[in-house]
Image: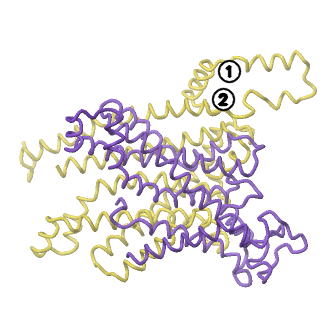
Amino acid sequence: MKWARTTAIVFLLAVSAACLLANVIAPASYAHQFRAEPNASASRQHLLGTDDLGRDRFSRVLYGTRVSLLLAPAAALLSSLMAAFIGGIAGFAGGWVERFVMAGTDLFLSLPWLFLLITVRALLPLNVSPIVSVLITFAMLGCLGWAGAARIICADARALSQSDFILLARASGSCGFRLLWRHLVPNLKPVLYAQFWISVPVFILTEANLGILGLGVAEPLPSWGSLLRELEGFSTIAGQAWQLVPLILFILVVSSFHLVLTKEELPV
Amino acid sequence: MAPKGLTRPAIWNASRRGIDTLSALPKLAGKILITVLIGGFLGATLVRLAPGFGVDEEELDARLSVRSLQALRETRASDSNLFVFYSRYLNRLLHGDLGNSRTLQRPVLQLVAERLPETLKSVALGLALGWSAGFLLAVAIVMSRAWYLDLLTSLLVGALLCLPAAVLALLFVLAQAPARLLLGLVVFPKIFRYSRNLLARSSGLPHVLTARAKGLGNMRVLVWHILPTAAPQLLALLGVTVSFAFTAAIPMEALCDLPGIGQLAWKAALGRDVALLVNLTMIVTLVTLVANSASDLIGRTFRTREA
């Protein structure tokens, strides 16, 4: 399956490059309204037609993909770092610290993810700008998504802290933060790497769910959630097939993220 | 006297298993209680920090005199003390009073009682469908080793894993398909993937290979050698899928217009009714914890037997 992995990486790089160059490639701004052409069909001017407000759909797909592709990995990085910090210290310290931290993690894991997210989302002030809303949405995902990874990292850190090389390092006088930073953390990198790549599609999917429910990124800033929300007004496929492009792109990007990890790197 | 077919050590082992399971019960009950208490305190904190806490629509009533308004504020003044607020919240919670919904102007308990059965029905049906399809397909693939079936199912599962539950709900509305089947479709790929990997790993264990080499039939190998090894982890997955199903119930009920607690949570989120949301989250957490604990307990019994 090496070819599938390579194709997925190349595809993700191509989509990322297109999104980063959205300012150059997109024919209009994501918020620009062609008021004379609402719900226009696909044409040379509007490759994917326009939405009900006359906004160019192709431009919105490019900008929306940029939002999700930049911020989902950022949220995944945040959650992986939190998991590394919490799980790493718990596994390294062991004893009551580990029991206490893992009890907290269990409590966090038993909370239903989407219920918790919409509760926290409902607490946020109403008068935030679209940029702040998108940052808050992904920061929230990052801050709430660490628990599962922390358990795995804690188990790995515990196993590593009992290994021979750590024993040798201890015997050589290495202890505390130095032991953690120089010897334990570098050996946790493969697990952290796997957790990072597992989290990215999870966060993209969650943002899409929140966006479709109207609880995600605020308009007019596009995100995959708000783009997929357009499917609500979709009645027939015939004659409107271009409206499915965001969905197809979404599926391709998420499946590419799933293919990035090799079978050996994935947990069961 | 020992029953027929059971030797004394077998009886001793069986009773020990029973004692182990029973001794785990108070621990699990304690864990659930502590989680609910901490969840209650966290919930109360969220309610207290929510925008609009301490403000009542009654105050906008122009007919109220200054003294009436003052009296109204005084009744809520005690809530500004955090400890008093927590103790009252907990006291009400222990007496089964979950407060009132700000947006729907009705007691939360009443709303939950009306809508929880609907969601439980959807979740039960979804889990039954997801487990039957996912587990049976995994068993069929592992036992038959049919690569084409594996490939086809893997592609389907891969596609389903890339679709958010909300998109599936929209597609169900578009296709006018029965909405209750949606939860089955959401949990199916997770169950299939995990079960297939687990069963494939178990079927490669030395004792299973020996059983096959000795000429045991497929069904015997599955029932006596593969399933007992994979059972504890599969049972743990059962608990986890309950949480998945409840989470997917929000987009399903919101978009397919099913009057369950998922739809209630969505409406509460749109109306920023934090008190209602916190209570709903706690109820779902409780249901999830009970499901997880039950599967954990059964899994523990299996593990003890295997040991």
Among the two numbered marks 1 and 2 on one chain, the one whose residue lies closer to the N terminus: 2
In the rendered view, tell whether residue B62 sits above or below residue A216: above
| Residue A3 location (% of width, % of height) | 41, 78
Q: Which residue is mark 2?
A: B48
Q: Position of residue A259 (x, y in %)?
A: 44, 69
Chain that bears disc 2: B
Q: Which residue is mark 1?
A: B79
Number of numbered markers: 2
Q: Residue furthest front?
A: A172
10 Å neighbourhood of mark 2: few (<14), some, or many (≥20)? some
Please tell me which residue is depicted at 78% across the width and 29% down the height of the picture.
Answer: B55
Image quadrant where one finds the N terminus of chain A: bottom left
Q: Which residue extends farthest right?
A: B63
Residue B227: horizontal and vertical position, in percent?
A: 25, 62
Q: Amino acid at mark 1?
A: Asp
Determine the CA span between mark 1 and mark 2. 9 Å
Chain A: what color? Answer: purple
Residue B152: horizontal and vertical position, in percent?
42, 80
Tags 1 and 2 touching, CB below 8 Å:
yes
Q: Tell me the mark number nearer the camera, choosing from 1 and 2.
A: 2
Is residue B122 visible in the rendered image? The answer is: yes
Subunit that carries the residue with mark 1: B
Residue under the image location 58 percent in, 34 percent down: B43
Badge 2 element: helix
Q: Are marks 1 and 2 on the same chain?
A: yes
Q: Secondary structure under badge 1?
A: helix
Give the position of the C terminus of chain A as an image quadrant. bottom left
A189 lies left or right of A65: left
* Closer-to-camera residue (B254/A160): A160
Chain letter, colour yellow: B
